Image: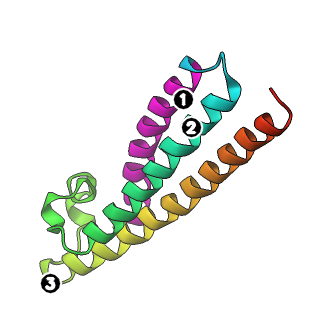
Amino acid sequence: MRRIAYETVQRACLFGSLAIFCVMVGMSFEPRLAFQAGGTLTAMMAIILMYKAREALTKPYRKTELWLYLPEELRPPAAQAQWASATVLREVYLTFALWTSAISIAMWVLALLFRLFGI
């Protein structure tokens, strides 16, 4: 269950990262601006992931992407399914939010360095 949750959240984050990368490439003529935009958009992605982690606690398990990809034989009984899927999804969302926020900080530091060195 954890592996499938990890894969579904990772795929969503990769699509978001692709969009952020495209914005940064579009601003590549001004590296400081590109990293500021990338840092801001990545921070927004981290906030969205934290929101999704909070939402995972109350979202019906049958409406999650995790449940759709989970094979029938690996699905927990209905009595434990809500708790199990909410716990796993919350943990995975928060893990990705942590990584994403670290990347956002790194981009902002690079933008600051470009600013300090006048690039």
* Amino acid type assigned to the residue bearing label 3 in the image: Ala
In front: label 1 or label 2: 2
For label 2, the residue is: 38
Tag 3 secondary structure: helix
Is 54 left, or right, of 67 in this rendering?
Answer: right
Circle 2 packing at 10 Å, graded few (<14), some (14-19), many (20+), is many
- Between 75 and 104, the residue placed more toward the observer is 104
In front: label 2 or label 3: 2
* Amino acid type assigned to the residue bearing label 2 in the image: Gly
* Amino acid type assigned to the residue bearing label 1 in the image: Phe
- Residues at marks 1 and 2 touching, judged by CB atoms closer than 8 Å: yes
Q: CA distance from mark 1 to mark 3?
A: 42 Å
Whether the magenta-drawn stretch holds residue 7 is answered as yes
Residue 32 lies in quadrant: top right
Tag 1 secondary structure: helix
Q: CA distance from mark 1 to mark 2?
A: 7 Å
The picture places residue 31, in percent across and down from the top left corner, at 69, 26
As drawn, which residue projects farthest toward the right?
A: 117
- Residues at marks 1 and 3 touching, judged by CB atoms closer than 8 Å: no
For label 3, the residue is: 79
Q: Earlier in the sequence, mark 1 or mark 3?
A: 1
The picture places residue 56, in percent across and down from the top left corner, at 27, 68
Whether the magenta-drawn stretch holds residue 91 is answered as no
